[in-house]
Amino acid sequence: MTATATPETPATPAPAPRHTGRFARLLDAAAPRSTVLMIVGGVLTLVGGYLPWATFVLNEGPYPEKATLNFFVDPFGVTGFRLHLVILGLAAIVVAALRRIPARHRIVRGLGIGATVVALINGLWITVEGGGLGAITASEGSIAFGSIAALLGGLVTVLGASAGGLERKPVWTWKLPWWAEWILLVVLFVIVLLLVAAVLTSGGQGGVVNPYAGVVFLSLLAALGGAFAALNASGLLTWVSVVSERHRTFSVIVLLIVALLLPLTSAGTEYWMTVASNIGVYAATAIGLNIVVGLAGLLDLGYVAFLGIGAFVAANLSGAAASHIGIHLPFVLVMIISSVVAGMFGAIVGSPTLRVRGDYLAIVTLAFGEIFVRSAQNNIGGLTGGANAIPNIPAMGVGDFKFSDSIVIGSLRLPSGVLYYFLIVLLVAAVMLVFAHLKYSRLGRAWIAIREDEDAASAMGIRTGPIKILAFLIGAMLAGLAGAFFAHKTAVVAYDSFRFLESVTLLAAVILGGMGTIPGAVLGASILFVLPEKLREFSDYRLLLFGLALVLIMRFRPQGIVPDRHRKAELTDPDVEDVAKEGPGPLPTRVEP
Amino acid sequence: MHAVEETPRLSTFLSQIANGLVLGSLIALIALGYTMVYGIITLINFAHGEIFMVGAYGGLATLTYILPTAIATTWYFALPIALVAGALVAMLIAVAMERFAYRPLRNAPRLAPLITALGVSVALQEAMRVFYPGATAALPFPNLFIEGAVVIPIGDGVVIRYVGILLVVMSLVLAFGLERFVERTRLGRAMRATSQDRDVARLMGIDPDRVIVLTFAIGGALAGVAGVLYGSYLNNINIDMGFQNGIFAFTAAVLGGIGNIRGAVVGGLVIGLVKALAGQYLPGGTAYDYVWIFVVLIAVLVFRPQGFFGESERVRA
């Protein structure tokens, strides 16, 4: 086993870093004691995890996992978000104390931010639920030191870490024997699976029965975010991705198998299978949209129409009682036809790209999307059912066997909907495969060239017209495929599911995840379609928060969670920075007549 | 028999023309904001429609919660107060939006401000729905002008309500005033200079940031006025009115040649007429009038993106 760590910064501490920016003075003052501060912060976080968080029992019963006075009943019971705090705090102390860990300030900062957000979310929620600040400091013998200590701890940790100067991410070049790397990858992917299951089910189903679902979920998300930031800072995440890149095929196969194993985890109930299938539908659609927006750079604001077209075609060809066509084709054929029809519409919608560019193209696609919704609402040609929708679409099946059945293998009973889940996993995998192959093909490079500079691309001999239409066509076909699946899975197709807002949400998923990348589209779709499921108690504010989130993402992280490597290089290299901007810079360019 | 059929047909036609003109002048008023903002920072400000909506609610809030009933029911007090209040609220929101959402993105890639605009639009609409009392359903809006209508005696009679006439007159006057302002005043000249070349304008001692804020403020105020007039004419307002009319107004702005004030007015009137006449005469009726406007929009963008009055086509990245 050869372990050679080559951190890019020397191990000796650099001379006291000079800080700039708003907190420069504070950071400069804290710099000499950065290690102490980090440890103090970690201890405070740890202590905060153990202290009581409220002096009352909340209105709807005790807050999950001993947040309330139950503390006195079970003083050392640390579960739920308190467990997260304890882990984050301990990790911060250990990493801060071990000076040999490269990039330890950066790692600790990730942990500190995680702890801060966890403390903030839970503290705020308890305060609000308990009837405001007065409740926190009220009598009953104890004060809610917990949230305050943990919040302070998180902030002090971040302060110490930032003051110590953030190192560059170290690069690890460990190379293990192939079988060890295989085992490592399998173990890691299984951990990821368990984490996904935990995230999905955390807090349980949202809604009236369980008002805490959303907060528990958000808190877990924050803790995981902190942990991932720390892992990323340590360079381990990059190393793992290098390892999995080395065993590409193996990783893909393991990932697929692991995804198929989700029904065996705690998420293996009918409800979560349905949620997961819906996420799959939107993930597949988002990948399709990613071709149009992420690769070819053509903004499409009416994309959900293709999902709708696929769904309505499938509904009409599957023998639903409400459809006028009244034929029942096998589902494989239905999916192919839906996909082709959606693709044809994609080519039609894409044809204005021959003459229209940029913002105007976005408006044209929006107009097409609106025309689709209006027509579907008015039950055009009797094909869409209008306001009555098309209900009772039969489940997919072969002979007597239905996809909606549950399956029993020996003592193992898988919930109904699990077959749909398997199907959508395979579908998403297929769509990913298509995307990956296209991205690195001649066609994909042509799209990227068009995105970067259409005139230059056409000067290099790319026939921009057909290639842009092809982007729309292929993207629409993928959406149509997802739509056909959607129609069978939900059994009802209504025009309401394909409004402008859905298009915006899909676009937001692509952008949030990172344009032009596969994990980005899947991650974005998962986040944006799990959140509303979890945040039912905030359902009034859901769209408001969504709108604000869009604004904030564009302001602070327009490249998304998983930025495209190619694009990232363009955006960070100072030499090409001006070219990387999509617009002509601050000057509006005109061609004088 | 034949002649009897002809006159009602004519009166229907004329009524639809009148409806179209009223709706069109309303759209024109909103389109002015679109066209000015696009002219200066080449941004399709999706949230402009919501500014119009917010203006309507601002006017309604003033009438319901601030003014005493005696004043709120006397049209010659209520109308100007509501118009000013709606304009102020809309202006405030528009300026805040520019400052906090768009200005930080001045040099960002083109996609970023467009998506921000979508986000602002969703957020404004939802903020209104959540925080304005009773806004989850359509709210009644009083007629702020004298009741009654002019009836032109043709066929069954062509009815034009006074408030409709007010709407047409006000938008024409405001559009004319805006054009004079842009053509004749120093500030207007600064706006034109900034839209032509921001950097050279800065060299000439113009502060582009101030000019851009001014543009948003004027556009917002006009949209606010439009909102109050819309409520007064249709007698109810809802939170969806912004998106739909915003798209109409954008279509009008493009139709007339974006960046062109006269074009926005003509475009607005054309869109209003298309909607009214398509609802009456084209297959599908009013259920599809919306669709026809989008067909016009696509056709214009594809075949004449510079619009009626646009002189040169911009290069768009």
Image: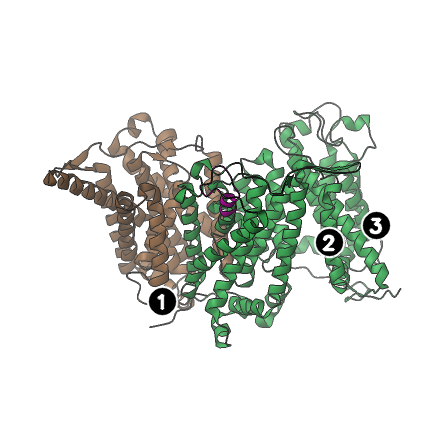
Q: Residue at x 64, y 37 (%)?
A: A214
Q: Chain of mark 1?
A: B
Counting from the top left corner in percent of width and height, residue B45 is at 42, 53
Judging from the image, the colouring scheme is: by chain
Q: In the picture, which chain is brown?
A: B
* Residue A553 x, y percent position in the rendering: 57, 52
Compare residues A490 and A235 and report the one nearer the observer. A490
Tell me if I can see residue A116 in this picture.
no
From the image, tell me which residue sits under label 1: B313
Amino acid type of disc 2?
Leu
- Crowding at label 1, few (<14), some or many (≥20) Cα neighbours within 10 Å? some
How far apart are the alpha carbons under marks 1 and 3? 63 Å
Labels 2, 1: front one: 2
The overriding secondary structure of the stretch rendered in magenta is loop
Please say whether residue A317 is one of the residues in the magenta stretch: yes
The amino acid pointed to by label 1 is: Glu
Give the residue pinned by disc 2: A255
Do the residues at pointers 2 and 3 share their chain? yes
Residue stretch in magenta: A313-326
Mark 1 secondary-structure assignment: loop
Q: Which residue is mark 3?
A: A94
Residue sitting nearer the eye, B134 or A327? A327
Q: Are marks 2 and 1 on the same chain?
A: no
Q: Identify the element where label 3 is drawn.
A: helix
> Label 3 is placed on what type of residue?
Val
Tell which residue pokes out farthest to the top in this image: A140
Residue A530, above or below A346: above
Q: Are marks 2 and 3 in contact (CB under 8 Å)?
A: no
